[in-house]
Image (tube, grey):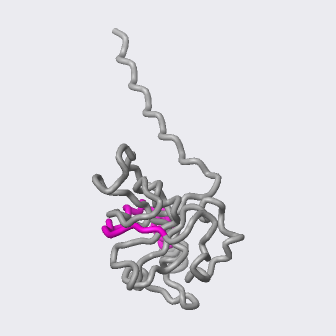
Amino acid sequence: MILSKTFILILLLAIASVEAKYKYKPPGKLHKGWGTAYSGAFQINKTGKNACQFDVRKLDRKWNIYYAAMNEADWKAIGGNRGGRSNACGRCIEVKGKKGQTTRGHEIKPIIAKVVDLCPSWACNKGSVDFSTVALKAITGYSWDKKKISWRYVDCPIPGQKPSPPKPSSPKPSPPKP
């Protein structure tokens, strides 16, 4: 009897931990700040070795084009000290430009960039992010400028994986025949 209660308890705990792993995660808190650029595509280390210590040869092509340097305040706020690195390292952010802060006719739509570096406090205030020129242009229509943005942490897409198409709604049942 005691063995079966123990087994049931262990089983319930295992199910709960699996459910917790796959639960829906709401989008992260919305941050607001300035978007700037510090180097071009495939130039992550142009200003020195990236603070996340990524080997750029091993990063997926997309992240060598759409990358970001997180401001120091948010870099520290997320915590971590993995070999001197922040938990921001390798996280993805979804970024949008702000109406009136983009080139004329630029469609404001979110882009995703990977955090690979730290933007020091003298260059980036809390909420601000420094991007590759390609990423900043996709966000604001400008490749070199200082424009208002909003961003949030999101899960990084898996390279080569296309988003799942929406599931078709189930057909409505036919009314019963008289």
Residue 159 visible here: yes
- At x 45%, y 65%, the residue is 93
* Picture quarter with the C terminus: top left
- At x 41%, y 78%, the residue is 71
Residue 62 horizontal/vertical position (percent): 61, 59
- At x 39%, y 84%, the residue is 121
- At x 37%, y 51%, the residue is 103
Residue 177 magenta? no
Extent of the magenta region: 11-37
Q: How many marks?
A: 0
In the shown orientation, is residue 60 left or right of residue 121? right
Quadrant housing residue 152: bottom left
User: Which is more toward the observer, 177 or 63?
Assistant: 63
User: Which is more toward the observer, 103 or 88?
Assistant: 103
Residue 12 horizontal/vertical position (percent): 48, 70
Quadrant housing residue 169: top left
Residue 88 horizontal/vertical position (percent): 48, 77
Residue 22 magenta? yes
